[in-house]
Image: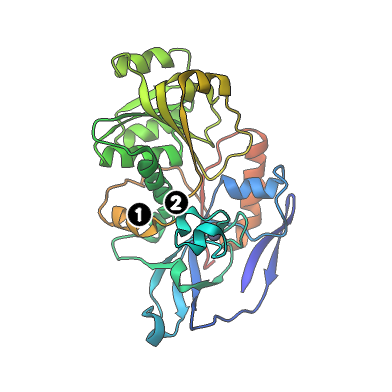
């Protein structure tokens, strides 16, 4: 197995290791495509003091190359999605059969080994066969859609609800599309014109600029009621005050994202309005539902700005991502061709 491993801040190098699956519970997968995101660049940047060394990357698809077909039903050459999240199997929630509430989830590329490697040995429960109608590239967004499903569940989105979404990047855009799928009305708010433009192209009707007129515009859209359900995308870079201002009294605010360093919230305002907060950081348990949503063409994934690179060029991807992070520029996801 060949992998890119971050060994220290701004240091990445290739490692080689041999490993073979225990075929009674694992399969071996040749990774074919993977996607790097701002999370990975942040890990490389080192400001959050991650525990090095770590193999990065949360999103990947591949093909099964070793499996005991008689015991688990997985076939060689089957195209699969690799679930980045597994439960700890030891905490209270895990032992009482509620793994979704696990207090120590293992997340690939965060606190567990990621997928920036040519082969992955994974337990049966971490691979999901992909139907033909789901392309490799679309499958790289499964965890985003799963995160959006978690938001819909927590906020109990119902037909006709107005939902303000602060942050129109990939996370906010996919949440908005899923809200439309459930016949509610998302309002995407961002200070980035490109994100608002992509939101419009993705079929999101209400898009607002995060500026001085925002409160009044949301008030007009909602008949002065403001919103009872608000999503704040933690990677959006907009002050969290926007989320509290657009909330009516007793509203629910979901703070959502894979990446959430340096989030500050004015609790006095939250207390005054008696708001309810949810914090949602992953889409654990929703992979199958997400694959079905893609197969049913419920989410349009074609409009996002994506970079692309080969496996051999991964260090360059990190270097240029880190430069952008320092310049406070938008960091686009990068699809890695793992075969080259
Ligand atoms: Zn657990």
Q: Foreground: 195 or 283?
A: 283
| Relative to 330, 141 lies left or right | left
Q: Disc 2 and disc 1: Cα gap in Å?
A: 9 Å
Quickly name the residue at label 1: 290
**What is the tally of numbered marks visible in this picture?**
2
Does residue 306 sit above or below 134 in this rendering?
above
Residue 174 visible (yes or no)? no
Does residue 261 sit above or below 146 in this rendering?
above
Residue at the farthest bottom position: 70
The N terminus lies in quadrant: bottom right
Q: Foreground: 337 or 114?
A: 114
Give the crowd class for mark 2: few <14, some 14-19, many >=20 residues within 10 Å.
many
* Residue shown at 53% from the left, 45% from the top: 258
**The quadrant where residue 260 appears:** top right
Q: Which secondary structure, mark 2?
A: loop
Numbered mark located on residue 156 in the image = none
* Residue shown at 47% from the left, 47% from the top: 306
| Relative to 236, 161 lies left or right | left
Numbered mark located on residue 283 in the image = 2
Image coordinates for residue 49, horizontal then vertical, percent: 73, 47
Tag 2–tag 1 contact (CB < 8 Å): yes
Image coordinates for residue 225, horizontal then vertical, percent: 32, 17
* Residue shown at 35% from the left, 54% from the top: 290
* Residue shown at 30% from the left, 18% from the top: 221
Front tag of 2 and 1:
2
Q: Foreground: 299 or 195?
A: 299
């Amino acid at each position: 197995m060949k992998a890119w491993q971050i060994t220290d801040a701004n240091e990445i190098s290739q490692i080689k290791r041999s490993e073979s699956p225990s075929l009674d519970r694992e399969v071996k997968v040749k990774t074919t495509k993977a996607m790097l995101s701002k999370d990975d660049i942040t890990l490389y940047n080192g400001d959050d003091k991650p525990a090095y060394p770590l193999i990065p990357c949360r999103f990947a698809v591949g093909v099964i190359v070793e499996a005991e077909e008689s015991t688990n039903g997985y076939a060689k050459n089957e195209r699969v999605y690799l679930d980045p999240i597994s439960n700890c199997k030891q905490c209270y929630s895990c032992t009482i059969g509620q793994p979704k509430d696990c207090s120590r989830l293992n997340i690939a590329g965060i606190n567990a080994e990621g997928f920036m490697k040519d082969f992955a040995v994974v337990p049966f429960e971490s691979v999901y066969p992909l139907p033909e109608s789901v392309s490799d590239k679309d499958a790289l967004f499964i965890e985003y859609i799963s995160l959006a499903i978690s938001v819909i569940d927590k906020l109990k989105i119902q037909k006709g609800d107005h939902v303000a979404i602060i942050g129109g990047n990939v996370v906010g855009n996919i949440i908005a599309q899923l809200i439309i799928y459930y016949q509610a009305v998302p309002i995407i708010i961002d200070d980035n014109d490109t994100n608002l433009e992509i939101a419009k192209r993705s079929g999101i009707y209400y898009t607002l600029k995060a500026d001085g007129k925002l409160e009044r515009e949301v008030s007009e859209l909602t008949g002065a009621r403001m919103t009872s359900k608000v999503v704040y995308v933690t990677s959006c870079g907009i002050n969290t005050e926007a989320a509290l201002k657009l909330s009516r009294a007793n509203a629910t605010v979901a703070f959502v994202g894979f990446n959430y360093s340096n989030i500050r919230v004015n609790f006095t305002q939250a207390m005054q309005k008696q708001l309810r907060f949810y914090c949602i950081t992953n889409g654990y348990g929703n992979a199958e539902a997400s694959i079905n949503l893609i197969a049913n063409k419920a989410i349009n994934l074609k409009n996002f700005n994506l970079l692309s690179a080969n496996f051999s060029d991964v260090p360059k991807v990190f270097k240029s991502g880190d430069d952008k992070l320092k310049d406070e520029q938008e960091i686009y996801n990068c699809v890695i061709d793992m075969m080259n």
